[in-house]
């Protein structure tokens, strides 16, 4: 049970990411018309209209594992700790309507740029969390997990392709990197005091 509580697996990380993207779409009044899929980026032929695709494409562990005391049910236990850098890819598809090319309507690029803006400024927007900043101001964030932090995002890429009917379509996407803190409790029992704490990065 302890491992489940402190180790964050692929599905738990994806769930946090999908929840965040759904919140971003809701704040932009797009949650009723767009869906989010936690799938590997599909082939061009398999793209679903009005869909944002989110997937983990690589994981990198930093350093060696260290030890850290963790407070569990009022008593400290020894834990193995490490950090993982996870690369996340976000892409979106909206079928082009040639009749609106000259009209001010949202394109898939607009939606993906909006999502990237929310991710880049994730401490400025989103739902007000219960965490407070150093000045006591409620912190706003789409990523409310204390074990997950966004550290960077890449430039937006626009993939071009032509459908069987000759329409020119775009599939915009970008990557962003998160760092996840991982902990696994050791079966050493609780201890009363801490004399040395080591944590490798």
Image: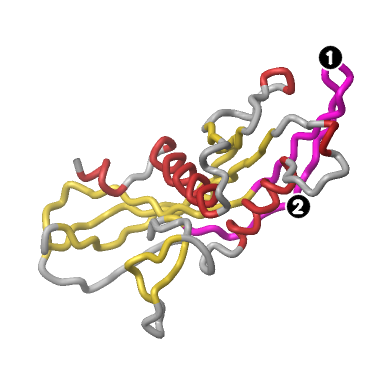
As for residue 6 lying within the magenta part, the answer is no
The image shows residue 27 at horizontal and vertical percentages of: 52, 54
The answer to which of 10 and 81 lies nearer the viewer is 10
Q: Quadrant of the N terminus?
A: top left
The image shows residue 38 at horizontal and vertical percentages of: 52, 32
The image shows residue 49 at horizontal and vertical percentages of: 65, 28
The answer to which of 181 and 49 lies nearer the viewer is 49
Which residue is rendered at x = 15% and y = 51% of the image? 188
Categorize mark 1 by other alpha carbons within 10 Å: few (<14), some (14-19), many (20+): few
Image-quadrant location for residue 71 = bottom left
Q: Is residue 55 visible?
A: no
Helix, strand or loop at mark 1: loop
Q: Is residue 76 visible?
A: yes
Q: Which residue is mark 2?
A: 155
Residue reaching furthest to the top: 164
Q: How many marks?
A: 2
As for residue 172 lying within the magenta part, the answer is yes
Instruction: Give the mark toward the camera: 1 or 2.
Output: 1
Q: Which residue is mark 1?
A: 164
Decide whether the magenta segment is chiefly helix, strand or loop: strand
The magenta-colored residue range is 149-175
The answer to which of 194 and 155 lies nearer the viewer is 155
The image shows residue 165 at horizontal and vertical percentages of: 85, 15
The answer to which of 162 and 50 lies nearer the viewer is 50
Helix, strand or loop at mark 2: loop
């Amino acid at each position: 049970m302890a491992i489940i509580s402190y180790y964050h697996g692929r599905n738990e990380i994806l769930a946090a990411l999908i929840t965040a993207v759904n919140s971003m779409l809701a704040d932009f009044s797009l949650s009723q018309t767009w869906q989010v899929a936690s799938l590997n980026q599909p082939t061009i032929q398999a793209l679903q209209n009005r869909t944002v695709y989110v997937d983990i494409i690589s994981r990198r562990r930093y350093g060696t594992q260290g030890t850290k005391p963790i407070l569990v049910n009022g008593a400290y236990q020894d834990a193995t700790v490490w950090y993982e850098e996870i690369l996340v890819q976000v892409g979106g598809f909206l079928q082009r309507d040639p009749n609106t090319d000259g009209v001010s309507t949202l394109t898939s690029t607009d939606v993906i740029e909006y999502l990237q803006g929310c991710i880049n400024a994730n401490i400025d927007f989103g739902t007000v969390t219960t965490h407070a900043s150093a000045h006591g101001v409620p912190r706003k964030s789409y990523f409310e997990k204390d074990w997950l932090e966004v550290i960077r995002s890449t430039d937006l890429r626009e993939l071009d392709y032509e459908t069987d009917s000759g329409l020119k379509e775009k599939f915009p996407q970008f990557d962003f990197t998160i760092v996840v803190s991982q902990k696994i409790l050791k079966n050493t029992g609780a201890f009363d005091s801490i004399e040395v704490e080591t944590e490798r990065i």
